[in-house]
Image (cartoon, grey):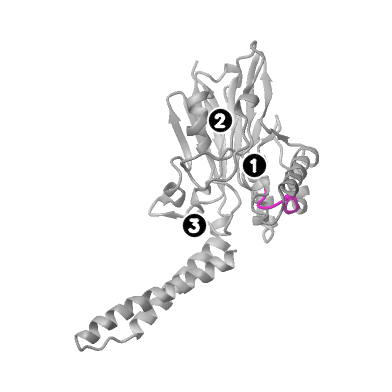
Amino acid sequence: MFISFLIFCIIVLLLCPTLVWLLCWIVARLCHHAMPYAPFAYTGLALVLLFCGTMLYGYWFGRKQLRVNETTYTSHQVPVAFNGYKIIHISDLHLSSFADSPDFLQRIIDTINAQQADLICFTGDFVGFGVEEAIPFTHTLRQMHAKDGIMSVLGNHDFALYHHGMTDEQKEQKVQQLTAFQRDTLGWHLLRNQSYMITRDTSHLQIIGVDNASCQGQGFQTVYRADLPKAISLPNSLSPLKILLSHDPSHWRAEVVPTTDIPLTLSGHTHAGQVRLFGYPLSSLMFTESEGWYHNEEQSLHINTGLGCTLPIRLGVPPEITVITLHSNL
């Protein structure tokens, strides 16, 4: 896929100056002037060399410039018992991204562990196509740890959507294999329209996790498997701080904000487009919320730009580990 993309771009870059020359040649011919081709040919060659150099930089360096983004979430809804609670938010591993650089995945895990977090939240797209991508990294992934464990949800790629030719039953088998791998082999708390309660003294933190929820109006439509009412249900006696893990950020604006009081949602999916031009991520062309923090009155969304890649390049959008420290302003 990446090679096909490169070939297509090279052909376009070579053809564009030729088409411009052809138009100029026609005009020049009508005016009885000559129009040499060489300057246009050199322009096409220069564009191809610039493009290839940029792609090589994004492949060899851009996708390995790991960034630790430290931020805070302050709210009166944070119980005093959870003041200073440290959450690591990561997303979009796409583990096939590390087939040629397992040492970089090891550096990611070591960097995560060095933060000594209370909780790790992974917001989906563990793999690109299937659990077979993860098996070679089992030992490395099992090293990742936090005091209260690792919570995760499934993203669109985790549902084997891009295995063309598979039946729905075969795709579901792939999903079940992935679920078993995360829960049984790695010991993660994979939340499939479920929640998990963490207690400090008499206060509670509810981590809510839903399957991928792709909503109308943003990005490419993929799959909607979320059941938010089911995931959020609790005994009436509990009033915890709620944090939602939902892979696709379009879910926040479409359902979370209008129908719930969940104060904090963590998402991924966009990768910020993996390319930033003139300060703007390419993902902003498709998503209303594409990276970082967004707020709507007392509800907030944080979008992590991911660790892996779909196309194996990153330009101006480094792989990201977000460290969110909770603060109470009671």
Residue 34 spot, x, y in % from top left: 25, 89
Q: Amino acid at mark 1?
A: Ile
Element at badge 1?
helix
- Considering the image in quadrants, where does the N terminus appear? bottom right
Label whose residue precedes the other's in the sequence (2 or 3): 3
Q: Which residues are magenta?
A: 127-134
Residue at coordinates 43% horizontally, 78% vertically from top-left? 45
As for residue 280 lying within the magenta part, the answer is no
For the residues labelled 3 and 1, the Cα–Cα distance comes to: 22 Å
Disc 3 or 1, which lies upstream in sequence?
1
On screen, residue 103 above or below 149 = below
Mark 1 crowd level (few <14, some 14–19, many ≥20, 10 Å Cα): many
Which residue in the rendered view is the most extreme toward the left?
Answer: 31
Name the residue that disc number 3 marks.
315
Give residue 112's mark.
Answer: 1
Name the secondary structure under disc 2: strand
Q: Which mark is residue 325?
A: 2
> Dot 3 surroundings within 10 Å: few (below 14), some, or many (20 or more)?
many
